[in-house]
Image (spheres, helix red, strand yellow):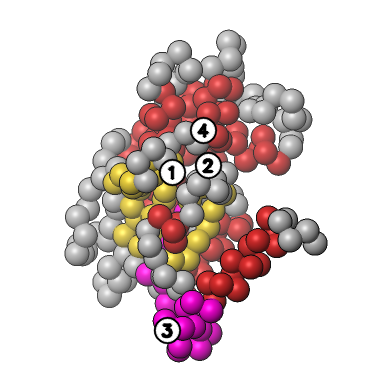
């Protein structure tokens, strides 16, 4: 392999990082190998500019991660449901954070598709027009394209993209809050469990709290901000997915 190959550089960087950690904390890897106790499940975008551990200065073992295009939580996605169940019930995380970001390519594509004249959200959607409707990418993005249409967002409005990014995070928070896994943990008075919605600004490196946090009905330490109209997002979720699972 070429020494300048990006994959080769990653291997070299890992070697340097491991040596530095070993020097600074000789027992770190030994302790890390014993198990993980993350405090947070991070549901974020796959975008390479939003690495959760880097932008939060977190340590290995702090954050359990589920990332995908446009930070979606699809209630019919068995992968996401498995991650959620394991994080909440086995790892016993205290928080879920759904994290969107500015200039999201997935959100841009969905906004553009919903802006096409004659767009009909009840028909099969080809968000990426040069790919078949049944392609994995189009199937994945269809709910977000429907969300743009639901809020009547189009590219004619310069604020529409940021609005869609925010509303997308809110919709995923709402979907998570209605899963059986989350409802069950909220029924346990011993657990102080919260869901939060944030947006990362690529131009500043800062996370913005959307103040849509949802917590247990028995109270807890965090403020129970439920921003926006939960009923609006619930209506959207049932239109897109039908009965919620989880």
At mark 1, the secondary structure is: strand
Q: Are marks 1 and 4 in contact (CB under 8 Å)?
A: yes
Magenta residue span: 19-43
Residue carrying label 3: 25
x then y, percent, for residue 105: 55, 34
Query: Height in image: 123 above or below 103?
Result: above
Nearer to us in this view, 38 or 73: 38
Could you tell me residue 101's position as x and y percent? 43, 41
Q: Which of marks 4 and 2 is nearer the N terminus?
A: 2
Q: Which of marks 2 and 3 is nearer the N terminus?
A: 3
On residue 100, which mark appears? 1
Q: Report the front residue among 55 and 6.
A: 6
Q: Which is nearer the N-term, disc 3 or disc 1?
A: 3
Label 4 and label 3: CA atoms lie apart by 41 Å
The answer to whether the residues at label 2 and label 1 have Cβ atoms under 8 Å apart is: yes
- What residue appears at the point 44 percent right and 21 percent down from the top-left corner? 153
- Which residue appears at 75% of the width and 30% of the height? 131
The secondary structure type at the circle numbered 3 is: loop
Whole-angstrom CA distance, mark 2 to mark 1, is 7 Å
Q: How crowded is mark 1: few (under 14 residues within 10 Å), some or many (20 or more)?
A: many
Give the labeled residue for mark 2.
Answer: 70
- Distance from label 2 to label 3 (Cα)? 36 Å
Is residue 29 covered in magenta?
A: yes
Q: Left or right of 10: which side holds 225?
A: left
Task: Please give the name of the residue rendered at 64% of the width and 68% of the height, measured from the top-left corner.
Answer: 12
**At x 31% / y 64%, what residue is drawn?**
193
Q: How far apart are marks 3 and 1 (CA)?
A: 33 Å
Q: Are marks 4 and 3 in contact (CB under 8 Å)?
A: no
Outermost residue, front direction? 3
């Amino acid at each position: 392999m070429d020494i300048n190959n990006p994959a080769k550089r990653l291997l070299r960087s890992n070697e340097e990082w491991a040596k530095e950690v070993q020097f600074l904390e000789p027992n770190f890897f030994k302790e890390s190998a014993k198990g993980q106790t993350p405090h947070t499940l991070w549901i974020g975008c796959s975008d390479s500019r939003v690495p959760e551990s880097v932008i939060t200065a977190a340590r290995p073992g702090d954050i359990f991660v589920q990332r995908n295009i446009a930070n979606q939580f699809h209630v019919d996605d068995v992968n996401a449901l498995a991650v959620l169940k394991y994080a909440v019930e086995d790892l016993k995380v205290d928080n879920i954070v759904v994290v969107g970001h500015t200039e999201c390519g997935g959100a841009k594509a969905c906004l553009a598709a919903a802006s096409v004249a004659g767009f009909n959200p009840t028909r099969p959607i080809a968000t990426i027009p040069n790919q078949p409707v049944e392609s994995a990418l189009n199937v994945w993005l269809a709910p977000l394209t429907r969300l743009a249409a639901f809020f009547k967002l189009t590219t004619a409005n310069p604020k529409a993209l940021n609005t869609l990014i925010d509303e997308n995070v809110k919709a995923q928070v709402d979907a998570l809050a209605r899963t059986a896994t989350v409802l069950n943990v909220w029924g346990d008075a011993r657990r102080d469990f919260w869901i939060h919605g944030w947006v990362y600004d690529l131009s500043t490196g800062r996370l913005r709290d959307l103040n849509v946090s949802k917590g247990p009905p028995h109270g807890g330490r965090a403020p129970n901000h439920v921003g926006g109209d939960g009923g609006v997002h619930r209506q959207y979720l049932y239109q897109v997915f039908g009965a919620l699972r989880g």
